[in-house]
Amino acid sequence: MNKKSIKRAFCMFLIMSLCCLAGCGARQEAEAVSDIKEDDLIVVGFSQVGSESYWRNVNSESMRSVFTKENGYKLIFEDAQQKQTNQIKAIRSFIQQEVDYIVVAPVTEAGWDTVLQEARDEGIPVIIVDRMVDASSDLFECWVGSDFELEGRKMCEWLRWFCVKNNILAEDIYIADVQGTIGASAQIGRTKGLEAAAEKYGWNIVAQADGEFTRAKGYEVTQQLLKRNPKINVVYCENDDEAFGAIKAIEDAGKRVGSNIKGGEIMVVSFDGVKPEALQDVLDNSISCIVECNPFHGPRVEAIIRKLQNGETPQKYEYVDEDMFSAHEEIESVVVDSKQYPVTRITQEVIDRRIMEFDSGDYGDQAENVY
Ligand code: GZL
């Protein structure tokens, strides 16, 4: 910890102690907070991918909600519009501003060594969040995010059991893979899970294309793939925004979305499960299965910074537990690497409860630490 951080840590301690000792109420606390000088705040520079999806917007809100002046922070938030060059510029700007911490949600895995080394040379700790960087692990303090390949494997186990329980032959499965931003960990892992399962179970992946994790591109890509491959009967969307576009493209092509593959319907499966609209699509059987991807990284990153402020060493890699959603009750769970993952059967009550959880910020967030 540099001198500035020590001073700020002491300031945070002082505010909390004074409030506790004085048993102050909200008004006094507000006065205590307003007395905090800018210079005493812990400055966090956050380089965010962009605003390409509902998931991303919820992720951004999760970060903004914890890095507040009330909590002793000043957040410098930079939206990169999905361009790595903008993220690198932002990180260099954070270094120039001598922030206390740099948090990066990297748009893709490659190309970070140089700028992370620059931050390291200036003694500024870096925390990677969400996707991973393909860089030496001593260039960042720790990483918080999801196991994307596991997400893909869970989805494919669900599809496998769906086929088994509905007597659909593997060779009769023709998959269009609407990928996420090429080179992003979420795309790499979800695609890898699909490709391995197709190889193992004998499914046909007839087409793969970059859907950029957006609704518009998901529509455009699905429309093109359906035209070229009339046999497609499963559209594997690597996030919900792509799935929303894919559903419209399938319907605009005069085809039916649904799980009745034998009856000529085209099945859509997806990842995220954040937007209530996506869970409604699961209830309506427009999306047959969603593997959840937890966007609430803010509290976990803030806890890491507190540990670093206190001179503690946080876990290097921190994953979260993630759920699965389907309206199909014939598959109650899937097993990957001998571990069982339950599938939550979507009902209107489940949807209503999750909306309430989101609104109250009580979203389930059991961090599972993996070294
Ligand atoms: C996953 C995240 C992905 C989401 C998409 O952690 O990186 O990026 O699945 C988002 O919705 O755009």
Image (cartoon, rainbow, N blue to C red):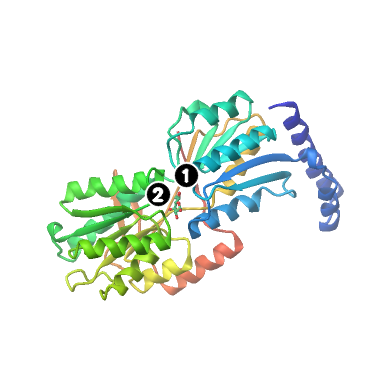
* Disc assigned to residue 325: none
What whole-number distance in Å separates the C-alpha atoms at marks 1 and 2?
A: 8 Å
Identify which residue is drawn at 38% across, 42% down.
183
In the picture of the structure, the residue carrying the numbered disc 1 is 107
In the picture of the structure, the residue carrying the numbered disc 2 is 181
Identify which residue is drawn at 15% across, 63% down.
168
Q: Residues within 10 Å of mark 1 (few under 14, many from 20)?
A: many
Relative image position of residue 163 (x, y in whole percent): 19, 61
Ligand 1 within 8 Å of the CB at mark 2: yes
Viewer-proximal residue among 283 and 185: 185
Tell me if 33 is positioned left or right of 227 in this view: right
Relative image position of residue 323 (x, y in whole percent): 41, 56
The amino acid at mark 1 is Val
Tell me if 90 is positioned left or right of 289 in this view: right
Specify which label sits upstream in the sequence, 1 or 2. Answer: 1
Q: In this view, does 366 lie above or below 225?
A: above
| Discs 1, 2 touching: Cβ within 8 Å | yes
Viewer-proximal residue among 227 and 357: 227
